[in-house]
Image: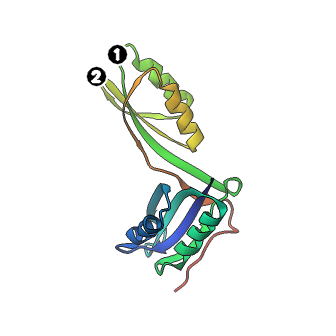
Amino acid sequence: MRRKVFQLLADNKSGVLSRITGLFSRRGYNIESITAGVTADPRFSRITIVTSGDDQILEQIEKQVAKLVDVRDIKELKPDESVYRELALIKVRVKADERQGVISLAGIFRANIIDVAPDSLIVEMTGNQAKLEAFISLLEGYEILELARTGIAGLGRGTENVTYITE
């Protein structure tokens, strides 16, 4: 099983994301993460999908998604030619005497403390998945009350692979 990150440019209109995820569902393909948002051109959305399978399945996924009417472009974001980032919000239970330990750990990882309550902290962190996983594993001695992750957002490096849609 290999993992691939696909970047789609699709029309920014109602039902597009549903049609894309429906294609995965109907064919029994798994989506490990999906992020979507409007681009600099409000007519289009950029959708990043992380999926896995053997080479044949991944090729089929790319071909099937490319056939969807609302999808204007699809490309693979290869790790060595792209930048991936993910956002995590982590709520950690801390007593007053434990708070500085989590704050120090967050500082090492360039994370931000965005909320402080009498018995918890919320840490905001961005980075690649390995960085997020490393930080979360170091929180092992603390109770993670809630965790929200966005999934990968990515862009290809440089200007060679920029897609321009003119209409």
Mark number displayed over residue 154: none
Up-down relation of residue 149 to residue 2 (above or below):
above
The residue that appears at 36% across and 28% down in the rendered structure is: 121
The residue that appears at 61% across and 64% down in the rendered structure is: 58
Q: What residue type is disc 2 on?
A: Pro
Residue 18 at x, y percent in the picture: 38, 68
Mark number displayed over residue 96: 1
Secondary element type, mark 2: loop
Q: What residue type is disc 1 on?
A: Ala
If you read the primary sequence from the N terminus, does the residue marked by circle 1 or circle 2 appear first? Answer: 1
The residue that appears at 54% across and 74% down in the rendered structure is: 64
Q: Is residue 133 left or right of residue 124?
A: right
Q: Is residue 140 left or right of residue 114?
A: right
Question: 66 and 89: which one is in front?
Answer: 66
Question: 15 and 114: which one is in front?
Answer: 15
The residue that appears at 30% across and 22% down in the rendered structure is: 119
Q: Residue furthest bottom?
A: 167
Answer whether labels 1 and 2 touch (C-beta < 8 Å): yes
Check disc 2: other Cα within 10 Å, few if <14, some if 14-19, many if 20+.
few
Which residue is the site of mark 2? 118
